[in-house]
Amino acid sequence: MATPRRTGRRPGNPGTREAILDAARAAFAERGFDASSIRSIAAAAGVDPALVHHYFGGKDQLFLAAMGAPLDPGELLPRVLAGDPDGVGERLVRTFLGVWDSPAGVAAVALLRSAVSNEWTARLLREFLVTQVLRRILQHLDVDPAELPLRGSLVASQLVGLALMRHVVRLEPVASAPAEALVAAVGPTVQRYLRGGLG
Amino acid sequence: MATPRRTGRRPGNPGTREAILDAARAAFAERGFDASSIRSIAAAAGVDPALVHHYFGGKDQLFLAAMGAPLDPGELLPRVLAGDPDGVGERLVRTFLGVWDSPAGVAAVALLRSAVSNEWTARLLREFLVTQVLRRILQHLDVDPAELPLRGSLVASQLVGLALMRHVVRLEPVASAPAEALVAAVGPTVQRYLRGGLG
């Protein structure tokens, strides 16, 4: 069944994509990811929901585009979390540093700077961590769901802090250390936060 | 011997303090803390060096004022680093969280937001960590000087990341957890970074 074009809804044009992203950022920051629907975002942007799906796919992908996320944790994390549970801390640090050290790292630095700059953008980063990262950990790793929020947010505190020191503040020697030296030093921390005792 | 007031140097007035702070921020960010002198900062601000000493005391205090630092690590850290070496990780996390959870935390959040926003302010935070925090650790804790930079920057990555998640991104449950729960969870990380094996 074809979607009829209704009065007052904009057809696809160069400004439409940006209008959808603006509406998505506002919705995700103000109401959160779970309470935002593609239907309501489309309405706020004055376009048909089918056009949102056409441009972005599902709600996860729309969120990643709205955040300017350089990659999709939903593609990356399942591989990292699979395999030997005793090595998940090191694999997570290695993959995380690999993203930041890659060309995608420029976008990641911009994202972090933006997220820290005000309440509104900080909320987007929080929604991103909760819905795109922590939930994937729960899906792919044997973690007690009741403990996941604390474990996951401790991991986030260490990894985001590491990226901040390496790529934004550029504190030496963390700024220019070989990634594997940081994997060896920080891997056990992440391992304990995910699977060890928390005191 | 009285310092003669020379031509072209401004006397103390309400704008003088701010002019000194501006000159100090520029000097510390551009040349670094060690290469900046009170004499050169005074010259850049167009005032007599004695006036800088009069307003701010020494170079450390001028730097803290220029940063907008809510307190002086030189007063806080010696107490934290003294005492049982096995408990230094927990004491450091407890003291750090205490500052951020106190009224001074508002200034700390502003400082962190500012530091992350651009290269110039990030350099000030880096100088602050190196000269005001890491050097104190070396002075008061039995750490191999060759290992101090890596150990100290790992501690900074964890503690600043924790403050970011608790007070800026407000990721739950780290955002509202009792400080002691975070001391128990993060203390062993900081302890290992300061005194344990780094892999």
Image: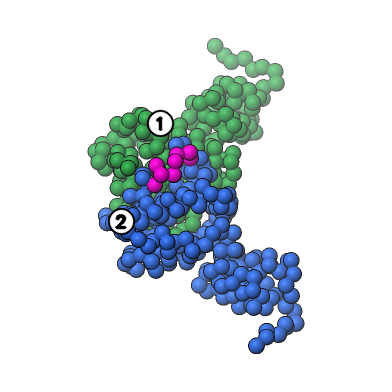
Chain colours: A green, B blue
In the image, which disc is placed on residue A15? none
Q: Nearer the viewer, residue A144 or B13?
A: B13
Please rate how many residues cluster around mark 2, counting C-alpha atoms within 10 Å: few if below 14, some from 14 to 19, many from 20. few
**Same subunit: marks 2 and 1:** no
**Magenta stretch: includes residue B176:** yes
In the image, which disc is placed on residue B86? 2
Residue B67 in the image, given as x and y percentages of width and height? 58, 61
Q: For the point 59% across and 23% down, which residue is it?
A: A40
Give the residue type at disc 2: Asp
Q: For the point 29% across and 40% down, which residue is it?
A: A196
Tell me the magenta residue range: B174-183
**Magenta stretch: includes residue B151:** no
Q: Quadrant of residue A172?
A: bottom left
Q: For the point 33% across and 65% down, which residue is it?
A: B143
A179 in relation to A59, above or below: below
Q: For the point 59% across and 15% down, which residue is it?
A: A3
